[in-house]
Image (cartoon, coloured by chain):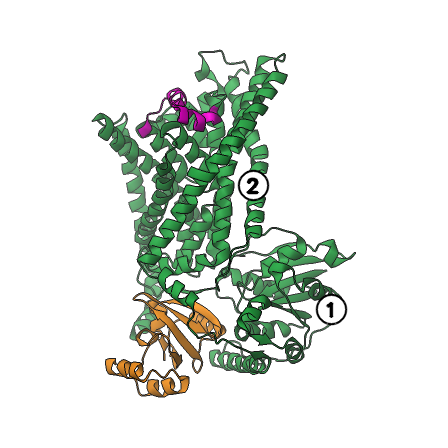
Chain colours: A orange, B green
Amino acid sequence: MIAQITLNNGAKASVPAAEAEAAKTEEKRTLMSAEPGNTYIIKEINTDDDEMNSFLFRLGCYAGEPITLISKKKKNCIVVIKDGRYNLDQMLSEAIII
Amino acid sequence: MRIAFAGNPNSGKTTMYNALTGRNEKIGNWGGVTVGSKEFQLKKEYAGDKEVIAVDLPGAYSMSPFTPEEGITSEYVRTANPDTIVNIVDATNLSRSLFFTTQLLELGIPVVVALNKTDINEKEGTKIDAAKLSKRLNCPVFETVSTENKGLSEMIAKAISLAGTAQEAPYMQADIDLHDKNAVDAEDRKRYSFVNGIVADVETRKTLSAETTSADKLDGVLTNPIIGILVFAVVMWGVFWVSQAWLGPLVADWLVGWIETFQEWVAGQLENSPAILSALLADGIVGGVGAVVGFLPLVMVMYFLIALLEDCGYMARVSAVMDPIFKRVGLSGKSVIPVVIGTGCGIPAIMACRTIRDERERRATTMLTTFIPCGAKIPVIALFAGAFFNGAGWVSTISYFLGLLLIFLGALLIKGITGYKYRKSFFIMELPKWKAPSLKFAFKSMMERAKAYIIKAATIILICNTVVQVMQTFNWHFQVVEEGAENTSILASIATPFAVLLIPLGFGVWQLAAAAITGFIAKENVVGTLAVVFALTSFIDTEELAMTGGANTVAATMGLTSVTALAYLFFNLYTPPCFAAIGAMNSEMKSRGWLWGAIGLQLGTGYTIAFLVNQFGTLFTEGHFAAGFIPGLIAEAVMVTALVLIARKVRAHFDEQYTLHKKTAAKGAAA
């Protein structure tokens, strides 16, 4: 996992397609382990909560869609979904697989 | 005819509604300001000679509600048959907004799209081809800026003219089994790809949303767990300081002068009338109501500052930074918004809890949010700070921060009682774009609330003061109470039994008990009643007196030391709020048990805080416990026992429920 991050860092290429390619090689990488400033393609949303899943869907946050990580703290992160910025807590960002 | 205003949260529906109707409904730069539907007639200039009712609805992302306030919107557009729907679309986030738009278009009701916030798009270089969008959606599209009244008259004229026509949907959901989750998902995906197709066709962006901007750097700092919370504390302290220690009192002093002049004038006019009439009018009504109105500037300055905060976009950041702390005590980051709104008034604060999704979190926030002193409690704080503590600013600061602390402790207590088990509680909050707060809107909001305050003073408080004055003047035989026999008055005999209970708190005299009781009708009454029962004609003068060192006359008349005064102040601040707020709590909680729990918790908290302050304060200043220490301890023991019993009952019930759900819980853990 750590190696992968360094690789992403070193490459500095934030082309969504490339990120998606990189993400494919990984097992269940969540938003929490992503690098700020990069755009990723969502692979899976896994909140164990149907209503929450469909709520996220309506914001445009669902498998196949891009998501950009703007900044990240220990307990929360800020992302861009479609054209809106959102603050997510740790639990939610761990449920977003990229 | 009726026109419904629907759209995503924070797209500017209420701002547009206010502009079109001339109302002054609450607005703010975050999603979820409007939590109930409101309706009013359109202004003549927009409606012409027709009678057109505009209906403002809470924001919704889709027709399937997620939080209670979203449900109000989908329910309304589905069942209330409005003649036209104005769909307010946030032009800065077209791709998300159109999802809901396409759903509204399916209802068959004519839809007009108001492409709002186009000024921001202009600034950012985003272009939307409105003509093309209109064609693709099969409905009229107007570019609007509701903060500047731009494009509104054309838009609303079209909306009015469309009434009675039928809407043809550009996209129709296939006939599917709505219980089949996969089918619904697939349909929603199709809808989104339809929307994405339109957006790609009509929108050109100069700056991509995903680029990191300077605003993002600011957000990074404000959501930092240490700096962000410090900034919030400083901002709130600044608001309280400016409104209650600096600018507010400055204006208040000036106003108080005028009120006194008026009171003297009234007394002068009544010189030749019976003493009772003069006492009733000059001291009771003008004095009592004047005492309350005199504090209006403090309240107004605070409303103005809070409105600025709400308008700039800071609230969403506060909510985000406070989420981890609030989560730890079993609340959510969204609980912060009711708390901040609660500094103005508890009723909108209680209603704002609707945006909290989890029922337990929502009810707990409803229960606790009024621990933050509201605008009506400001006169009480200011009076005591002035009369007993030389107008010290720390009294108000400590009142607010103690309120916040009580919210945390109360939340922990509720968490303990309800046997809260670990459950996934997600937090997502849209961070709206920053904007310069509008002084005009803040001023309007301030004047609106000042008006409400004056109306309240001239109605409820006036009536209460008159009743208190009459009850104090007469005894049960309707004879005028003689001097020296004040204890025989109606008021005294009613309040005395309550006063006994308050002895351990250090203020067991009937006058203070009566003031606290009238406070449940409206908290400003505490000040008004004190002015009446202690017959301090120039009671409102306390601020000036404090400065000249004469506040002691007030302090001495009330028979309170600084310790017991603080205890009395806290008692009034943290016991249940006014009846109106309790009513709001009742309708939001929809549960007798929770409501009584809330009232009990608040009574217990107010009592306990006052007890601790009085007993330990006295121990500290005089070296011994105050009177009634043992009875007070017994009262506390009774409360703790009640708490334990309730907790046991609730937990037993919870366990029952929990066993029922064991299967799903196990499944969840396995996944």
Amino acid type of the residue tagged 2 in the rendering: Ala
B411 and B182: which is toward the camera: B411
Give the residue drawn at x 54%, y 13%: B479
The mark nearer the N terminus, 1 or 2, is 1
Work out which residue is located at the far right of the displayed protein and give it. B49
Q: Position of residue B412 (x, y in %)?
A: 31, 51
Quarter of image, res B150 = bottom right
- Which range of residues does the magenta coloring cover? B539-563
Q: Is residue B360 visible?
A: no
Tell me where residue B401 appears, x and y as whole percent.
35, 44
Q: Position of residue B178 (x, y in %)?
A: 53, 76
What amino acid is found at the position of numbered circle 1 in the picture?
Leu
Q: Residue at x 45, y 24 (%)?
A: B494
Residue at which label 1 appears: B162
**Is residue B608 left or right of B216 when viewed as pictured?**
left
Asked if the magenta segment contains residue B530, the reply would be no
* Secondary structure of the residue carrying numbered label 2: helix
| Residue B543 on the magenta segment | yes
Residue B393 relative to residue B446: left or right: left
Q: Give x and y (percent) for residue B121.
A: 56, 70
- The dominant secondary structure in magenta is helix
